[in-house]
Amino acid sequence: MKRSVFIFLTSFLCFLISLGFLTNAEATKKFHVKWGATSVRSGLYANTVAMAKVVNKAYPGEIEVTVVETGGFLENLSRLQRKAIHIGPADAAAGYANYMGIIDYQGKPNPNLRTLWGGYITPIHIVVAEKTGIKDVRQLSGVDFAMNPGTTSGRVIELFFKALNITPNYKMMGIGASVDAMKSGVVKGWYKAGFKDSAILDLEANMDIRILPVPKQLVDQFNKVYPGQGLMMEIPAGLFKSVKTSQPSLAYVVTDFVDKDVPEDVVFKIVKAVYENRKEIVGALATLKEGNFEDMFGMAVKYINVPLHPGAVKFYRDVLKLKIPDKLIPPEMKKR
């Protein structure tokens, strides 16, 4: 009798497995990814949601991405280091500092940090009231200047000024308050990241402003003091009324970092899904389009100094047949 019951239960178990009814077994195969983002109030939150959507659609039952609201890019680096999330967008320069254990992360390197792709670039405009007569960023010492603490662009601006011994009279405030402070004359200068940024358009509609150029020699000096932190780009003539000719600008790159311990095949599939759907993602999100996210690998070669994850290397090298520069090969692959 007992033998018959055992045979029956064994047969029934095999039958359930064959039909795929054992959800616990299935769950062990599925990799659950926590993808940090930003605040839901930020337009950048939609970027992460769009990428998570294409991954979930491409690999149902294999990968399940959950987008996690966070305080933003710098917080994502902290969460990655604590392994509270698997993936998260962050400023590429801050990620390099985190990886190396320098500047903000002095003595606290994160050797497990890896990159997925090149991300997108956005300029940081340094704005002054036209009536100040200021034409060079080095004239900003002593000038009342709005500073938005906790922002990625604020971190870049503060380090840039410090490297060049520029000492504005900082007035700490929020982004919205900075616009009002410029209009009322409470401050004479400010900064804002973005291409055709609405806050700067608002200022131009109400006052005469100047967007200061940032020449390469100043960015080079920035990088001598703070390695890997000075990125730049050319903004086109006519981007704003005050930009009469194309000019160099400070910039930062946002990329998505990943923990080294996320399985190679999972990262391979994530990169593959995003790459194959990149035109759809970029088409719906102006920030990614303007920032050239579509050139995922080219942007990595140009701007990224944290190694790629082995799964990303495998996709770019084995599928796209691209040559991976040494700086993007992770240490664990160099040992193979």
Image (spheres, helix red, strand yellow):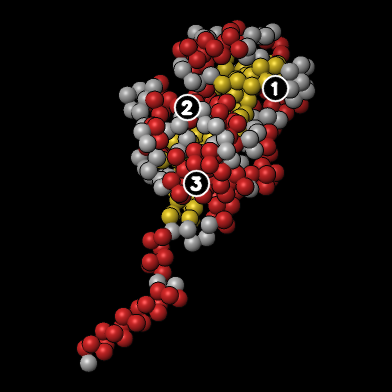
Circle 3: residue type: Phe
Cα distance between the residues tagged 2 and 3: 19 Å
Q: Earlier in the sequence, mark 3 or mark 1?
A: 1
Q: Is residue 263 left or right of residue 197?
A: left
Pointer 2 with pointer 3, Cβ within 8 A: no
Give the residue pinned by disc 1.
Answer: 235
Q: Is residue 306 visible?
A: yes
- Residue at x 58% of width, y 46% of height: 274
Q: Is residue 4 left or right of residue 192?
A: left
Q: Earlier in the sequence, mark 2 or mark 3?
A: 3
Cα distance between the residues tagged 3 and 1: 34 Å
The image quadrant of residue 136 is top right
- Residue at x 64% of width, y 19% of height: 249
Give the residue pinned by disc 3.
Answer: 268
Q: Position of residue 91 (x, y in %)?
A: 51, 31
The residue sitting at the left extreme is 2
Cα distance between the residues tagged 2 and 1: 30 Å
Give the residue pinned by disc 2.
Answer: 326
SS for callout 3? helix
SS for callout 1? strand
Closer to the camera in the image, 28 or 137: 28
Q: Earlier in the sequence, mark 2 or mark 1?
A: 1
Q: Residues within 10 Å of mark 3 (few under 14, many from 20)?
A: some
Closer to the camera in the image, 261 or 193: 261
Q: Quadrant of the C terminus?
A: top left
Q: Is residue 170 visible?
A: no
User: Residue 148, relative to residue 88: is it above or below?
Assistant: above
Mark count: 3
Q: Position of residue 300 (x, y in %)?
A: 55, 31
